[in-house]
Image (cartoon, coloured by chain):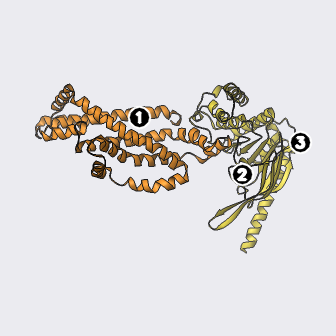
Chain colours: A yellow, B orange
Amino acid sequence: MTRVLELRNLTKDFEGRGRTVRALDGINLRLSRGEFVCVVGASGSGKSTLLSMIAGLMTATGGEITLDGEPVTGPGPDRGLVPQAGTLYPWRTVERNVAFGLELLPLDTAERAQRVDWYLAETGLSDLRKSLPRQLSGGQQQRVAIARALACEPDVLLLDEPLGALDVQTKEDMQVFIRQVWQDTGATVLMVTHDVEEAVFLGERVVVLASEPGRVIAEVPVELPDDRELGIKRVSAFLALRARIEDLIRAERRTAVDDATEQSA
Amino acid sequence: MAIPLLAWIGLSASGAISESFLPSPQAVWSAGLEMARSGDLLRDLSATAQRVLLGFGLAVLVSVPLGIVMGSFRAGAALFEPVIGLLRYLPASAFIPLLIIWLGLGEPSKVALLFVGTVFFNTLMTADVVRIVPRSLLDVSYTLGASRGEVLRKVVVPHSLPGIIDAIRVNAAAAFNFVVVAELVNSTEGLGYRIVRAQRFLQTDRIFAVLIVIGLAGVTLDVALRLLRSRVGRWAA
């Protein structure tokens, strides 16, 4: 399999009030074309920082990010980003939101319209194409954000807790939706979430981050059938996998707390 | 609207206040009608409107791009903000003598007063509107392939447009203030001039009529800008 995205020894420090805080420490990660990888970790594990750096919105302190072998130097349409909420252009209709990135590419009008139509249909938004973002529900808004990022046909789709602001029912519907879109489009997806269940349901592989500094403590392959429905969340193989990852995060947190008490003692 | 009007009618009908201080509504109406018939009113109104359009129009043309630059680029803010922040506290009317020395008694000094009186506020208000464009919206635009210029043109400007029109509405009222001040000083036509002239002959009825015309003109401009705002800002409603 070809590697699309590769992170080598990626490190990020934040400077503030005369001290340096290490947010990410020596992250190594490889994504192959068409893969769906989820990154889980507690708050403070630097998961969003990680995505911002891959998106090119933030520079690394050390290490390297390459896309198809080329180092990442800034943001670009080859890496689509979907943040948690509220990133649609409120003055643009659904279809014009989806068209935003395409307007910046050298495409003729017919091809642009065709692509917009295809991604609207794929994300189930065709009937809402003339609506404004404020007329949509939270779940619909995230569909638009995903369609907009996908329309540029990026090498990798970066999802930054895209379902974090949704209610439980909408969230589950959207999980099914994201898997469906991934299977239909063959996109390469890197998704960050704090929800272990979500990560196991969606990912082919789950990368577990520890906090302060954020670092990879485990990579867990998800050996579940490709054809997943919500019911799979109650299957024992699923539950075992979920428990294993939650234990990893919990154990890591306990060590951190023990260290802290030792230091203060 | 109705209460002050009724109070006026009542007060002038009671005869408690002399007609030369507080003319009756009927007297004001006929004074206005007389000025309108002679053509004076229309000429004054168009002279005043032209000054507002030119002086405030120039101020908008300068302040909107300047405000966008100040709101978008830290360097822009560092360069202009201290100067403009100071200049806006200097009362524009205090510039009248200076403007007359520099530009003479004619039109340019009047237009310049309107410009000076509104340009600084409109710049700072525009910059504030631009600053509230969410960071996440800009970031996502860069990841969709937009350059800095494209983000400015396709994200910052449309997002700020309703707020910019709001700022223009507020400062249009100030422009109306300054145009009358400018015309009080030295002019041969305009609504402010008409007031000074009426004062010389103690024609309070005419002064009242002109004040009402100024008020109506201001309201008309405000309504027009409100309509524009609700058209442009439908997405924000």
Which mark sits nearer the N-terminus, 3 or 2? Answer: 3
Residue B1 appears in the rendering: no
Residue A158, relative to residue A133: is it above or below? below
Q: What element carries label 1?
A: helix
Chain letter of disc 3 in the image: A
User: Which residue bears the numbered disc 1?
Assistant: B225
Q: Based on the displayed image, in which of its 4 quarters is residue B218 positioned?
A: top left
User: Which residue bears the numbered disc 3?
Assistant: A1
Q: Are marks 3 and 2 on the same chain?
A: yes
Q: How far apart are marks 2 and 1 (CA)?
A: 43 Å
In the rendering, at what x and y percent does residue B119 appear?
A: 40, 46
**How many other residues sit within 10 Å of disc 1, few (<14), some (14-19) or many (≥20)?**
some
Q: How far apart are marks 1 and 3 (CA)?
A: 60 Å
User: Which residue bears the numbered disc 2?
Assistant: A53
**How many other residues sit within 10 Å of disc 3, few (<14), some (14-19) or many (≥20)?**
few
Residue furthest bottom as drawn: A265
Under mark 2, the amino acid is Met
Under mark 3, the amino acid is Met
The structure residue drawn at horizontal position 27% and vertical position 46%, both measured from the top left corner, is B104
